Amino acid sequence: MNMPTFMVLGAQKAGTTWLHECLQEHPAVFMPQIKELHFFSRAEDNRFSRRHLGFDWYLAQFSDAAGKVAGEATPDYMFYPYVAKELHEFNPDLKLIFMLREPVDRAYSAYWMWRRHTPDLPPFEDVITRHPEFLDRGRYFTQISRFLELFPREQIFVAIYERATAHPEEFFKSLFTFLKIDPTFVPAAASSSVGGTRILPGLRGMLLYKVVSPIINLSFILPIWRKLRRTRVRPLLWSLLGAKSTSGEAQAYEPLPTDARARLTAQFSAENQKLSALLGDDLREWTTSAG
């Protein structure tokens, strides 16, 4: 029976989407057409949960994985406290790949991702007060520790988003070595832009995210779209729609005020120090960002 042997988890949606696309390109890897299966998410925590469909449905998503390393990418698995135990019960030999982004940037990016289709959303600092999970999702040491209580360290690969996207060839060589597949393969998507939140004003944004996006994600359309998005078609479409991007030089939203960043950075300081000690990594990219 084919079943996943690795999972991609994390707190950065854009980063895990990029990682998912790059992994799909590797000839030795199989990943389902549906990104974020959410099978191990509970319905009370996530409206996309597919737990009710049962294990037969879940395993069927990997029915074509014969002879390949199979995996799936559902970032939210990292956040829910019960998932570590359930994944271990499902397959104690699972390899776990965590994609982590500097926690303040992660929270601010998530806010603007929500706001792009909720234009009347309150200011950022009001939202993080009302919805503490915006910050809790950036407490990585706490979340990863739950997995380390069950899985050996050698089955866990922690990727730093800023480092992976700045040096993708080096990153994928390490990741593919971890998965024990050809480490010399370089995905075409590795050099694509990562992390830009597209902002569409008014009705155009609502139509795109509420109507067009569900159609694109249909099983018979999604593979075609994934091929097209690596060509000039995707940027041309965004341009025609009048979308602004948060990637590159032109920012679609204002930067987080310096005082707010300093205050939030201080809140994550102890957690980041424990993560740094756990990983044996100085997390220098985050220190530079905070400074």
Image (spheres, rainbow, N blue to C red):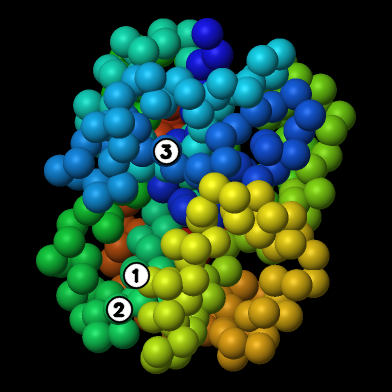
The image shows residue 268, relative to residue 194, as above or below, that is above
Point out residue 249 in the picture as x, y percentages from the top left corner: 66, 81
Q: Is residue 157 visible?
A: no
Inspect the image, locate mark 2, and give the three-letter code of the amino acid beneath it.
Answer: Thr
- N-terminal label among 3 and 1: 3
Q: Quadrant of residue 227?
A: bottom right
What residue is at 67 percent from the left and 37 percent from the top?
23
CA–CA distance between discs 2 and 3?
Answer: 24 Å
Q: Which residue is mark 1?
A: 114
| Nearer the observer, 260 or 237 | 237
Q: Are marks 2 and 1 in contact (CB under 8 Å)?
A: yes
Mark nearest the camera among 3 and 1 is 3
What residue is at 24 percent from the left and 32 percent from the top?
52
Query: Please, what secondary structure does the residue beneath circle 1 have?
Result: helix
Residue 127 is left or right of residue 201, and the answer is: left
Q: Which residue is mark 2?
A: 118
CA–CA distance between discs 2 and 1?
Answer: 6 Å
